[in-house]
Image (cartoon, rainbow, N blue to C red):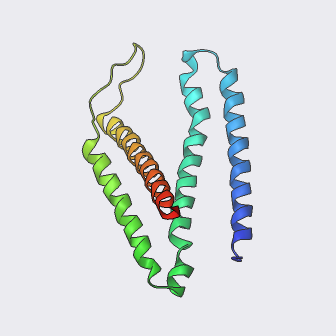
């Protein structure tokens, strides 16, 4: 078994514990807030969740880059698979940017309107999730059918 798997499991447990504690803190703090007049305080309570999510994305990106390195060193042919994955991800991002819409949404009175770039970014993320989910479902169906055909 790979030597680093023990350390990765420890890292996953530490990240999970920090996430649970942080979510518990936010739920307890938000439960004590009562009115919209405390909006700034609510934003300050929820803000650590956003910071933590950015930290998790950074850790994920770092591990996604570093973990395949030993495999590529052992077998340079495996670099092609990594390259294909990166190209596929780039295609998903480009498609989601092209389909993203920045039109303003109707808001209830008392709320500040959201900028066009924020709406476009959120729309891009949602579209990319839809594309990846659709691709995962399609791959699952195709591999299932291929396995059934191979068994006969």
Of all residues, the one furthest to the front in this rendering is 152
* Residue 117, x across and y down, in percent: 31, 39
What residue do we see at 34% from left, 53% from top?
A: 93
Of all residues, the one furthest to the top in this rendering is 109
Q: Quadrant of the N terminus?
A: bottom right
Left or right of residue 83, residue 24 in this image: right
Most foreground residue, 6 or 152 = 152
Q: In the figure, 108 relative to 112: above or below? A: above
Q: How many marks?
A: 0
Most foreground residue, 44 or 133 = 133
* Residue 105, x across and y down, in percent: 32, 24
* Residue 16, x across and y down, in percent: 70, 50
Left or right of residue 148, residue 26 in this image: right
* Residue 39, x across and y down, in percent: 54, 23
What residue do we see at 46% from left, 54% from top?
A: 145
Q: Quadrant of residue 25?
A: top right
Q: Quadrant of residue 119?
A: top left
Q: In the figure, 7 relative to 78: above or below? A: above
What residue do we see at 34% from left, 59% from top?
A: 90
Left or right of residue 98, residue 128 in this image: right
């Amino acid at each position: 078994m790979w030597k680093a798997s023990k350390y990765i499991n420890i890292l996953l447990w530490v990240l999970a514990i920090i996430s649970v504690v942080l979510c518990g803190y936010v739920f307890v703090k938000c439960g004590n807030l009562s009115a919209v007049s405390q909006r700034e305080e609510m934003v300050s309570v929820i803000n650590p969740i956003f910071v933590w999510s950015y930290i998790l994305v950074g850790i994920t990106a770092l591990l996604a880059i570093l973990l395949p390195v030993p495999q590529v060193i052992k077998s340079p042919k495996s670099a092609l698979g990594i390259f294909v994955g990166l190209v596929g991800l780039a295609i998903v991002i480009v498609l989601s940017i092209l389909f993203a819409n920045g039109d303003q949404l109707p808001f209830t009175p008392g709320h500040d309107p959201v900028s066009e770039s924020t709406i476009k970014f959120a729309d891009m993320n949602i579209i990319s999730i839809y594309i990846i989910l659709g691709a995962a479902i399609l791959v699952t169906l195709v591999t299932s059918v291929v396995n059934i055909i191979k068994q006969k």
